[in-house]
Amino acid sequence: MPAIYTEKWYEAIINLANSRDDISQKVPQGEWRVAVEIEGDGKSPYIPEGTTKYFLVRFLNGKVAEYRESPGRIPGKGLHYRIIGPATLFDGIAAGVVDPVEVGLNGSITIRGDMRVLMQHADMVNAIFEMYTQSNVSEWPLGKPPYA
Amino acid sequence: MAEDTYDAVVIGAGHNGMALSTYLARSGWRVLVLERRLEEGGGLSTEHYTRPGFLHNLHSNYHTFVGLCPVYDDLNLVGGPDGVTYVHPPVQMGSLYSDGTALSIHTDMRRTHASMSRFSTKDADTWMRLYKEVKGFQDLMIRTLMYAPPIDVNDITKALAVWKVEEKTEFFRAKLRSMTINDFLNKHFENDRIKAMLAFHAAVCGYYTDLVGLAVSFPFMLGKIENWKIAVGGSHRLAHALWRQMRRAGVTLLPASEVSEIIVDDGRAAGVRLTDGREVFADKVVASSVDLGQTFLRMLPDKVVPKETKQDVNRYRYQDGSLFSVHLALHKIPRYRAAAFDPDINQAWVLNLGYETLEDFNKDWRDIRQGKAPEDPKLNVAVNSLFDPTDAPEGKATGLIRVFAPYCLGEAGPGGWESFKQVYMHRCIRKWQQYCEDFSDADILEAKPYTPLDISSKLTNMVRGDWMVGRIADENLLANRPSRPLSQYRTPIRGLYLCGSCTHPHGFITFGPGYNALQVIADDYGLEKWWVEI
């Protein structure tokens, strides 16, 4: 399995997300653009401390149409959400050991954007999180990021 | 008038109408704003009310959404040569108690904790946990729950249940929907003085502490307890900043232009007729920032308003009470006896003088609902000159006393204030003096009352002296405000939108109604939302 934040890992995530028609048919249709900023925090070995990885995830009609890394901060125009936080937490979410709702609520991960759609599709948000955190697509065993 | 046809005609030049018109003009629309009064700004009203040189904010005094509301940034309203200069007092508010003690709320929450700890270390610790928890999701929720067209509260509570938020937070519970603010405070806090301080903050924000359902909003409100700011030179400076941006964007503003009728053609709002007979036409939108009664029962032809809408308008309720104010020109800034206990209280901006328990609030709410001015007035006092010396001549100060009060004084109705206002003003001043050190009538150059009747006479939008322009209660918030069918800023008349404080979220200088109406208009007309930057 690929290392997290590599091209192969992005592909694995896209394939995983797009394999679930039960989810993609129920989520809001149309285009949704989400920027993710993962900050190296000195603990995660995947992102050097003081640097940030920038991703753009573009959903189209319930499918991931694009999941790419960007060399710099993605401009805010045209985005629907921006999610910012330390790498340890993102790694932990991918490993299924960090609750994304909890870190969103306590502000450890900042979410910008209009939450109304997410609230109105709260079940789907949970399903996406479960899919993401309980499907083992990174090189470490589920529940155990290698530096934990 | 140079033109008589615009893309949008906005009725009312309060802060919501001004902001909406500026966004639309910057989107390329030709926009006209019509204002009944001679000046723009609505509740952003600052006048030399007592004596020349003394600037009094007759309506809005506390600006608590600066830095939280996107409009300030989008329209460059703060700082620079064209924007407002805000002062952020380090001691935001305080309570003075009859035993000479005092409690102060600081921008530095460690100092707030220290002040609360003198009354209860347990409550001080609870406060810090509550504040930290709310701060975690405040920005997200304010954007979602205030600066977006409202969703059903059931959607919100369902999401909280699905995400198991109750297991992940200490204070956020679905059952807050069935609790009063008093219930919330009694559940989590033990000390009467601390409870009264936090309840005072809610009351000044327009939230009655004994109404079931308002506990759900209370934690969010507390998250901005340290965000109270003063516009240097008076609140009207914000209207000036808006006015400059409107002009720059090409908006036409016509003061002294009262709308008598919204012209409806083939089911579409096609323009307006003014009281002097002039007609102005709108190719796309007429947006009303005035109250429901004026829009639907006075301005629209009766035959075009559906029966259900009329029923909704007639059912719409206003706040139980209003505010009685005293504006003062002072020789000096008062000092307080309680400064011996807490020296910071002399530097606190918004002061509670008299509320010591939750029951004190309950009693006043009962009196107000019965049409009685509280016999022993409990005050909300602010001396802006502490932080803005430009609001008074050198060496002098401007003062403000406010009291929660009924609009109708018993059987005398609102007109009863005319004969009672001087008596009540002096009672309020006496009350203030009780807490002061060496502050006599000789220190007051002039005092002038401003009654609930004055509020609604000056700003007809504020029906019954209600500066929130509609009841703050569970049944009138989010997608229930002002009614379910009208809650998305659209009306049954095609092309007619609501953008005033009768819509979600409410009055106060939030800009929420104008901003949210903008989102809906942009969706309906395919405008690029240049202002949205995530």
Image: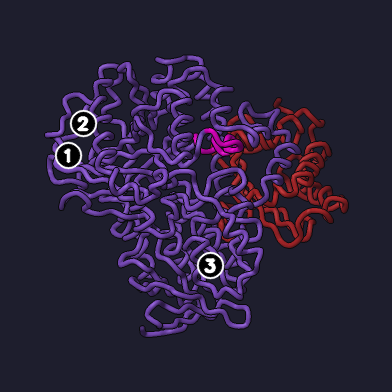
Which quadrant of the structure image shows residue B487?
bottom right
Chain painted red: A
Category of crowding for the residue at label 1, using alpha-carbon neighbours closer than 10 angstroms: few (below 14), some (14–19), many (at least 20): many
The image shows residue A46, relative to residue A71, as above or below, that is: above
Of A131 and B194, the residue lying toward us: B194
Respond whether the residues carrying marks 1 and 3 are from the same subunit.
yes
- Indicate the secondary structure of the residue bearing disc 2: loop
Q: Chain of mark 3?
A: B
- Residue under label 1: B330
**Mark 1 touches mark 3? (CB < 8 Å):** no
Q: Amino acid at mark 2?
A: Pro
Distance from Cα at disc 1 to Cα at disc 2: 9 Å
Query: Please, what is the dominant secondary structure of the magenta stretch?
Result: helix
Which quadrant of the structure image shows residue B341?
top left
Q: Which residues are magenta?
A: B210-222
Measuring 63% from the left and 78% from the top, which residue is drawn there?
A: B267
Q: Position of residue A77 (x, y in %)?
A: 56, 60
Measuring 77% from the left and 41% from the top, which residue is drawn there?
A: A126
**Dot placed on the residue nearer the N-terminal end, 2 or 3:** 3
Queried whether the magenta region covers residue B219, the answer comes back as yes
Category of crowding for the residue at label 3, using alpha-carbon neighbours closer than 10 angstroms: few (below 14), some (14–19), many (at least 20): some
**Mark 1 touches mark 2? (CB < 8 Å):** yes
Of B263 and A140, the residue lying toward us: B263
- Residue under label 3: B297
B409 vs B156, left or right, is left
- Residue under label 2: B334
